[in-house]
Image (cartoon, rainbow, N blue to C red):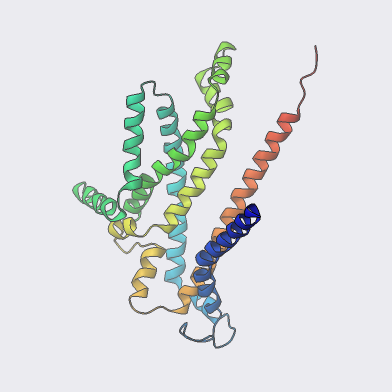
Amino acid sequence: MMDNRASKLGKFYIIFVFLLMYMPIFYLIIYSFSKGTTMANFDGFTLSHYGELFADKRMLAIFLDTILIALLSSLFSTIIGTMGAIAVHNTKRRHQRETLLSLNSILLVSPDVIIGASFLIFFTALKLPLGFWSVLLSHIAFEIPIVLLMVLPRLDEMSPSLINAAMDLGATSAQILSKIVLPFIQPGIIAGFFMAITYSLDDFAVTFFVTGNGFTTLSVEIYSRARQGISLEINALAGIMFVFSLVLVGIYYLIENHNLSSGRKLDRVEVPDR
């Protein structure tokens, strides 16, 4: 009886948490189809706000810039973060490893306002113009620790015997990296890449400090427009971004399922007797 009650209570809690998270999103999306101009009352179904959004060339340009920043920063941070994870994993001394992990965690635990102000001072000192490149470099910097922490556990799970066997068979360092290490840590690399995209799309505080020269991202633009009063065009944008996020999640799960299926097929392969 106690187990059944605990199970029902757990299910109720999970449903409650998901409703708490998704109800505000659904509330925004529902009113993106309202004929009215505010979220006070739903005045009937219309797609006019989506038409206004697609006619807003500035917002479309900002949307494309945001996606471009997210993809480029995720790509570079995944490459650098993966290399960093391999370097940390290969560190022999425990003290050095803990020091590197502590330094890596600074950008994760530090307040975004402090990070953004630090980047602003850094770029100003280097006399680097604020705009596309400053935002891109900032996003790469705070995404690298995320990728590293996603990849490092996969490296720790890898048995050293795999590397030793490859070396005994005469494999070069490049072959070991491309044929053994990277395929083994691929799930962590993919997870880090998608997490980096999510963090880039979601970031506001850091981007707010380092943007300039007419360049901006969706989060900063929405904040600027919200100060003048929320338009239902923003609701339509929220709906599109939600669908885009679902597509990203779907792609991630398709890749994960493909990797799991491939792994199961390899496990089923039987070595023939000599």
Q: Residue at x 71, y 29 (%)?
A: 267
Indicate the position of residue 80 as horizontal and vertical percent values: 42, 37
Indicate the position of residue 52 as horizontal and vertical percent values: 50, 78
The quadrant in which the C terminus is found is: top right
Camera-nearest residue between 219 and 107? 107
Indicate the position of residue 212 as horizontal and vertical percent values: 29, 60
The quadrant in which the N terminus is found is: bottom right
Indicate the position of residue 195 as horizontal and vertical percent values: 48, 49
Camera-nearest residue between 94 and 8? 8
Camera-nearest residue between 11 and 197? 11
Is residue 191 toward the left or the right of residue 81 in the image?
Answer: right
In the current view of this chain or complex, which residue is farthest to the front?
Answer: 1
Q: Residue at x 40, y 78 (%)?
A: 230
Q: Residue at x 51, y 48 (%)?
A: 194
Report the label total.
0
Evaluate whether residue 51 shows in this view: no
Is residue 45 toward the left or the right of residue 38 in the image?
Answer: right
In the current view of this chain or complex, which residue is farthest to the left?
Answer: 125
Q: Residue at x 47, y 82 (%)?
A: 39
Camera-nearest residue between 10 and 158? 10
Q: Quadrant of residue 34?
A: bottom right
Q: Is residue 260 above or below residue 206?
A: above
Q: Is residue 171 above or below residue 140?
A: above
Q: Quadrant of residue 250?
A: bottom right
Evaluate whether residue 231 shows in this view: yes
Q: Quadrant of residue 149?
A: top left
Q: Is residue 195 above or below residue 38?
A: above
Q: Is residue 81 above or below residue 96?
A: below
